[in-house]
Amino acid sequence: MHKSPQDFFHLDEIRQIINHFPSASSEHIQRFYERDRQLTKPSGALGKLEEIAAWFVGWRNQYPPNLQHPRVAVFAGNHGISRHQVSAYPSAVTHQMVQNFVQGGGAINQLCQEFDADLRVYEMALEQGTADFSQSPAMTAEECVRSFAYGMMAVEPGVDLLCLGEMGIGNSSAAAALCFGIFGGNAKDWVGYGTGIDQAAWLRKVNLVEQAIKLHKNQATDGFDWMQHVGGMELAAIAGAIIAARLARIPVILDGFACTAAASVLYAYHPSALDHCIVAHQSSEPGHKLLLQKIQKTAMLDFNLRLGEGSGAALMIPIIKAALACHNGMATFAEASVSAKINKE
């Protein structure tokens, strides 16, 4: 990267970064599988644990693998669309929940403490929030670029795994609009019940999303434009963090629907842009299942979660640690004096 994120002035500058993304290290993945074939287990017996460990090795560009400093980054933002009561909670809850995180009272605080993970919470202009995207673009071009850059700057040296999450009243509406704008279909395919709204509120949410796409479709040519027009500051920051993590060779764990919707902006620009990302869980939001199909990802877990705040992503930390521990610590057939598989001609 030739300039600092705070020096970006246009979305085109961020688009260009994706064209220069590094790839996973085939050399380190090869070293992983050379040892894996010698471990005291049938080939492939650890299933997804082996796949996760190889993925981590390739993107960290490191062998043997080592996970010491996982970070959970939660981006919080408010949305103008929430004035239409598309959530069961008022916008003030976003700030109140951020304070709850600061005081250690959120679910994500307990998970990070249990898994020895670093937690950072980033407020995205909560007093201002975005504009009502059913009436005008959610953000100006400058606000959108600044949000991407803010997320990029949140990726700091020393972190070796980045788990991303969000907090924002109204962001499931923004996520649905993003997905509808980028991937098409019907608004009802993407709009869910979010925080637990009733049928009347859901129908209102569907209508607002439809209205927004009709309003902005002639101005939005790709996912980055859709982020500006119907997205959110915290969602743009998540996408920015994913970009910076790729440049720093830090594997990324995505949380639920809103987080994955933010990431889909990058996928829509280039399908390989999310190769360094794993989706932690399939949200109970109906649009998430469809979105995973669109971006060709399979969620690792399905726990019927819909909390957000990086909670599902954090659950992957001990699983990844377990995958790496098995690879690093298991004995080989030779070390354990165990007969290896008989190779038949």
Image (cartoon, rainbow, N blue to C red):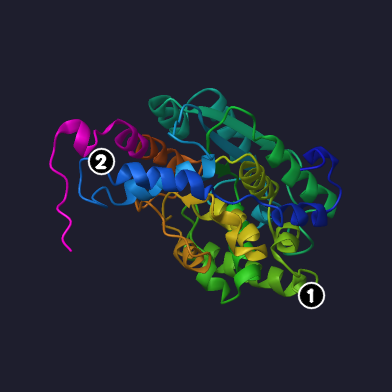
Quarter of the image where the C terminus is located: bottom left
Q: Which residue is drawn at 64% across and 68% down?
A: 182
Q: In which quarter of the image is residue 337?
A: top left
- Is residue 86 visible in the rendered structure shown here? no
Is residue 242 within the magenta segment?
Answer: no
**Where 297 sits versus 96, above or below?**
below
Give left or right: position of 40 versus 1. left
In the rendering, at what x and y percent does residue 79 appear? Answer: 68, 50
In the rendering, at what x and y percent does residue 128 appear? Answer: 76, 42
Q: Residue at x 57, y 38 (%)?
A: 74
Give left or right: position of 260 versus 110. right
Closer to the camera in the image, 237 or 331: 331
Camera-side mark, 1 or 2 = 2
First-in-chain label (1 vs 2): 2
Q: Give the range drawn in magenta.
A: 322-345
Amino acid type of disc 1? Answer: Asn
Q: Name the residue under label 1.
A: 218
In the rendering, at what x and y percent does residue 321 appear? Answer: 37, 34
> Which SS class for mark 2?
loop
Quarter of the image where the N terminus is located: top right
